[in-house]
Amino acid sequence: MLGRLNHVAIAVKDAKKAAQIYGGAFNAQISEAVPLPEHGVVTVFVTLPNTKIEFIEPLGESSPIAKFVERNADGGIHHVCYEVIDIIASRDQLIKDGARVLGDGQPRIGAHGKPVLFFHPKDFSGALVEIEQA
């Protein structure tokens, strides 16, 4: 059901600054900063040969990651994202297996313009899991 690791997301105060550190250290391509108001974040991606690192910063005080960044002032791993062939079938199978989908269970469009869903970290050994339609 799960495909390749699409990205690891790191929540930080300043996504562009954090991405520049990684881009410089690994000579990697850095995307533009993109605000995603529907998710309450600004994203910047660093593209590596086998995956991406997504830096996310809160977009406003009501951002769902604002408290995470407040608790982790230097930043921290926020979630991992896996690609799936069929997001609805994957969602249904994960729920059947006992995983709890966050939100209303309906996919929303993510940073790559594709449908995404998040699953509760308590169901995945403490890791917030995002699945993205491949």
Image (cartoon, grey):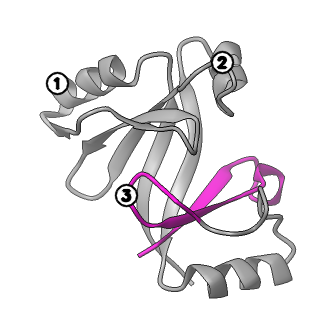
Instruction: Report crowding for label 1: few under 14, some 14 to 19, many 20 or more residues within 10 A (C-alpha).
Output: few
Where residue 122 sits in the image (x, y, percent)? 83, 52
Q: Please state if 57 lies on the left or on the right of 40 as rendered.
A: left
Cα–Cα gap, marks 2 and 3: 24 Å
Q: How many marks?
A: 3
Q: Amino acid at mark 3?
A: His
**66 sits left or right of 50 in the view:** right
Q: Is residue 100 above or below residue 33?
A: below
Please give the range of residues in magenta.
108-134
Front of the two marks 2 and 3: 2
Residue labelled with disc 3: 112
Amino acid at dot 2: Glu
Q: Is residue 27 left or right of residue 127?
A: left
Extreme residue toward the front, this view: 37
Q: Which residue is mark 1?
A: 24
Q: Give how far across and how far down residue 78 sits, in percent.
A: 59, 38
Q: Secondary structure at mark 3?
A: loop
- Identified at 57% across, 84% down, the residue is 1
- Which residue is depicted at the point 43% across and 66% down? 114
The reply to whether the magenta stretch includes residue 10 is no
Residue 119 figure quarter: bottom right
Q: Residue 126: within the magenta?
A: yes
Q: Is disc 1 in contact with disc 3, using a CB cutoff of under 8 Å? A: no
Tell me if residue 5 comes above or below residue 38 in the rendering.
below
